[in-house]
Image (cartoon, rainbow, N blue to C red):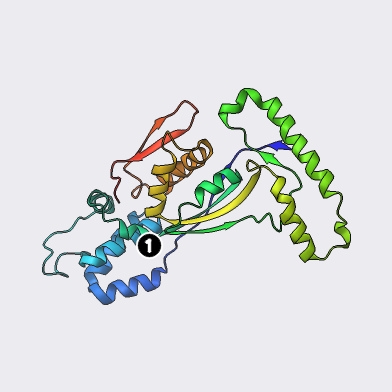
Amino acid sequence: MKFVEPQVYLIGETKIDLAQLKEMLAAIGGSTASEWFSKTQKASKSEGELLTEVAGRLCYKSFGVGLNPNVTKIRQSSEEYIQNTLSKGDGSIFEHASCTFAFVNVSRVFTHELVRHRVGVAISQESLRYVRPSQLGFWLPPELGDKKAKIKTIIENIEESYRDLEGEFDWENMNFDVKKRITSALRRIAPDGMATSIIWTANHRTIRHVITMRTAEAAEVEIRYVFDKVARVMKEKFPLIYADFEYSELADNTRSWRPKFVKV
């Protein structure tokens, strides 16, 4: 066995077809919308935030004064626009852009918690029906920090028993279907704490919600550890969408993040 640390990788995010977007804006708003886009694109820090703002302004045709007779003034900056949208709780526009994360060396305790969040997500998890582990990885929660040696012995005993049982099968002469069925059966003796990997895609409205829920002080420690990392990434990459998030330091060296505008 080996002790591991959960890792967070932002491996994908929404990209815009800029040529098509320019054509669309010119079609619905002429030079007014085109000028708005040119100015806003230069100042934008991410395409996800840019797409979010386009979606919101489309609803009211608020790319500039004159496009909608009911609109006599507009919010000029993206920061002002998104801040106002968050404060009103108009969360639907934050569903258009998404991010894809790889969570590596997380436990099945973590993944069982994560998959409870179903709305606005896509999930692909390492399958222990097909993957026969070569080594058991284990993250040590801080509550067990002074029991490291004992935990190591327990996991090594489980792994030794697993290897003994694994060795009773003639893997070299099995077809893949039989390997799959035996691998699936053997996983039942592996602990929920063993390390695995999962790909998780979610839109920004969902990510805001999950950060809020899963970094709360009462949250399970590993999922708080992971989504503290997620929150730090999102604050840096998408400073407008997550501008209202503030944190408090907890005793286990994680952060509890809470937005000013909860109902988005």
Asked if residue 161 lies left or right of residue 206, the reply is right
Q: How many marks?
A: 1
Q: Residue 160 occupies which quadrant of the picture?
A: top right
Q: Position of residue 187 (x, y in %)?
A: 71, 50
* Residue situated in front as seen by the camera: 234 or 46: 234
Q: Residue 27 occupies which quadrant of the picture?
A: bottom left
- Residue 108 appears in the rendering: yes
Q: Position of residue 154 (x, y in %)?
A: 72, 32
Q: Position of residue 246 (x, y in %)?
A: 35, 37
Give the residue displayed 49% in from the left and 29% down from the top. Answer: 253
Q: Amino acid at mark 1?
A: His
Q: Which residue bears the numbered disc 1?
A: 96
Q: Position of residue 202 (x, y in %)?
A: 45, 56
Asked if residue 110 lies left or right of residue 238, the reply is right
Q: Residues within 10 Å of mark 1 (few under 14, many from 20)?
A: some
- Residue 132 appears in the rendering: no
Give the residue displayed 51% in from the left and 35% down from the top. Answer: 221
Q: Is residue 21 above or below residue 10?
A: below
Query: Is label 1 in a helix, a strand or a loop?
Result: loop
- Which residue is outermost to the top? 146
Give the residue displayed 40% in from the left and 60% down from the top. Answer: 97
* Residue situated in front as seen by the camera: 227 or 130: 130
Asked if residue 23 lies left or right of residue 3, the reply is left
Asked if residue 189 lies left or right of residue 16, the reply is right
Q: Quadrant of the N terminus?
A: top right
Q: Is residue 227 above or below residue 46?
A: above
